[in-house]
Structure formats: C-alpha cells, structure tokens
Amino acid sequence: MSLELRKVHIRDVVLGGENRLTDGVLFIDTKELESLILEDHRIRSVSFDLARPGESVRILPVKDVIEPRAKLEGGSSFPGVLDESMTAGGRGITVALKGCVVTTTGPIVGFQEGLIDMSGPGADYTIFSQYINIVMIIDKHDDINPHEHEEVVRIAGVKAAAHIGEIGLTCEEYEKTVYDWPVIGERYAQYPDLPKVAYVCNCMSQGLLHDTYFYGRDTKKMVPTMVSPLEFMDGALVSGNCVSPGSKTTTFHHLNNAVIDELFERHGKELNFVGLVLNPMMVTLKEKYRGAMLVADLVESLGVEAALITQEGFGNPTTDLMMACKNLEDMGIKTVIVTNEDAGTDGLSESLPDMVVEADAIVTTGNSNATLLLPKVDRVIGKLEDIERVTGGNVDSIKPDGTLLVEIHGIMGSHNLQGNTLLTAITV
C-alpha cells in the first residue's frame, strides 16, 4: 500500500464568484458551494465567513474542523461518506490544502462544542488559530432532532472540504511525500535491530452525539480492528463527536494524527512501526472488557516489544485506556499512554478517574480544568451566549466588560490527546 500526499500551501482565501487557485491564493465560489450544501433539504440556510490568524475574531460553537482534501487518483477523499461504493483509503494520490480548514458552526447541537480564538491568549491553546478558517454557519429546519442535526453538520462539513479540495487538483506547486505500508511480513522483517512498536488509537463510540465514523460506518458497530495508518491520512475516519472540545479528535486530527506522523518520522531510525489498532470505546463495562481483550490480542499478534495508546474524551474513556494498558503490560509489552488530566481549576483534585499500577509511563496533555480569561474581541462568528452551555463554560463565563472566563476544556483541540496541540509538559 502506497499513498502519495501532495501538500498545496494556501496563503490566503477569497470568498467570491469563482473557483481557482493562483499563487497560493484560494478563490471559492460561495454560490456554487451553497447550492451543494443545500442539496440536503434538512438545511434551512448556510452562509460562509473567514477568520484569519491574528484577527480579533472568535468562532463558536465549533462542531468540527476538516482539512480540504481531494483524490487525484485512487478513490474519493472521504471514502464511504459521500459515495455508496468505495475504494480503500491510503492508496493513490491525494491533494491536501495546507494552511486552511473548513470549520462548521451554527446553532448548538450538543452541550460539548467549543470556541476558536484567532488572536490573544486563547489562540495560544489551539492549533486552529494558525489556519485560515473557512467558516460554514449551518442552520437546520426546526423539526430536525439533535442526532440528525449532528449528521447534517457532519456531512455538510465533509462535502465542503471535498469540494474545496478539488480546486487544488490542477495545482502544479506542491510538496510531495510518499508513504509506504508494506504487507505485515515485510513490515515485521524491516529493521531487525530496532524495537517493534504498535499504536492503539482509542476513538469515541458511545452514542449520545459521541461517535466516530470509519468508512462512513458508526464505530459502535465495530470491534477493535487492525487498520493502516495511511487510511487515517486519507479520510477513512470522520468525527461525529460532540465530546468536550478540548479533548475532541476532530476530522482534521484524524487526517493529521500527530502520533502517526511521529512514528513515521522515527521509523527506521529509532523504532520499527509495524501496526495500528483502531479501538472503539464503548459505554458498558462488558464492552470495555471485550475491547481491551481484543486490543491486547491484536497487538500481541504483531509480535511487538512496545505499544502506545491514545485516548479521546475524558471520564469513563480513561477506563478503556487503563484496561488496555494493563492487558498489554501483562503480556510483557511495554506500554505508554497519552491522556489529559481533570484536576479541577486549582489543580488539586484527583486528575484521573481510573488508574492501574501497570500504567507507569504516561504522557499528559495538561489540566483541562485550568481557567483562562479571554479578552473581548472585535467580531464573533456565531453566538457568544452559547459558551454558557458548553463544556468549559458556565452561566457566569461572560463578564460585564465583555471578557470571557472559560476552562481550557472549552477551546477546540486545546489538549488533544494525540498530542496535536500547542501545550507541552515538563517534569518538575
């Protein structure tokens, strides 16, 4: 399996009446895009806006962030989402527009949506402040229930990202990277003197607007599965998750999984990256036991010396994380886990809701409950009052002088559990 990723760098975006890409400037025909989105008759209206790095702009409530992608050859950019038949991701040539993102917003779906600040202290806690945000404000008809509302927004975001990505297909200026993923026997035999490492990616699969989609299929209907990291890079995973914004794995994060990027960077130098297991995190204790058992069986079958597990969400997903860690350690596989902490606004509360003694190598992405006072901004895309109903905010978040008091939890991707974040950790 081989994937050629062509990264086209975007330096500005113009909303207008034509689709073209010239000298790094992306022009988008918003009328054409609007017609495409309104093909879904559940949508009452859609409008578009731009938020650029450094501008005094706040976007909320943000539902998902997606990097524009298109396939030059080898299938569709988000296989299984927009098409009935499909070709597996991770093959062929994919064009990725770097420097811009599609950001979906509009009336709130669930209570766990967040904000993006393009400047000020809030911008220091989200990678999305560094991108030109092509914001879609989506309003659905009144008879659409919350679960259908989530689907409407999810599909619209993917449609827009795929449509915009196609504008870059003819661009001849790009940075090319080729990723190879040989068959398992070849992977195992590579670099015999280096430790063999597997990655377990936990994804939210709990219903109640906490879901992930693999080739368009709800991962609640799956068990832990061996997949190719190139499928992650090529649109096989789409977020349908309204989990707390700080720890949410957006579709952008799936496409640009920081752990996968780092494993490929170290592959052949410090380690041999031989396998990836996608682990849907379920609700019941029995399902958690089943998932942890199957994860351990799959990883053991790879014959690795070490494994890395990342989490999504907080609270009961920590149990999935710890169970899998314990099972792997019991098999003699050295395991590192990545999680955030919920230690209260003063940092003195118990930071993890579950723990096992085998979890002796932990990377933290920070205390999600730490608070920030965000300044008043010149422009808000969305409805500022929605901060009172999302994780990280409350009825006292909006101050009389226009400032905003929120927990880091409320900032989109602030402590992303794949490590794709601006936060860092030090040992003291």
Image (tube, grey):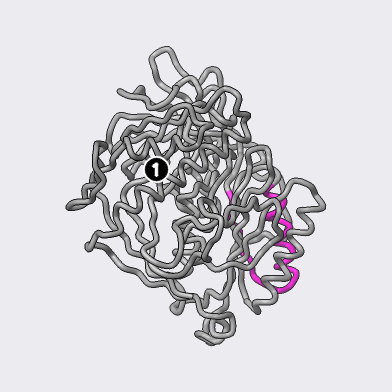
Q: Residues within 10 Å of mark 1 (few under 14, many from 20)?
A: many
- Specify whether residue 333 is in view: yes
The amino acid type of the residue labelled 1 equals: Val
349 left or right, relative to 37: right
Camera-side residue: 33 or 135?
Answer: 33
Q: Is 313 inside the magenta-drawn segment?
A: no
Residue reaching furthest top? 400
Q: Residue at x 47, y 25 (%)?
A: 405
Q: Which residues are magenta?
A: 317-339
Residue of label 1:
102
Residue 282 at what x, y percent from top left?
A: 72, 49
In the figure, 303 relative to 138: above or below?
Answer: below
Q: State left or right for residue 395 relative to residue 421.
A: right
Q: Nearer the viewer, residue 326 or 102?
A: 102
Position in image of residue 150 (x %, y %): 57, 37
Residue ID at (42%, 42%): 126
Task: Give x and y (percent) for residue 264.
Answer: 45, 70
Asked if 408 appears above or below 291 in the picture, the reply is above
SS for callout 1: strand
Q: Residue at x 50, y 54 (%)?
A: 254
The secondary structure that most of the magenta stretch takes on is helix
Q: Position of residue 34 (x, y in %)?
A: 38, 35
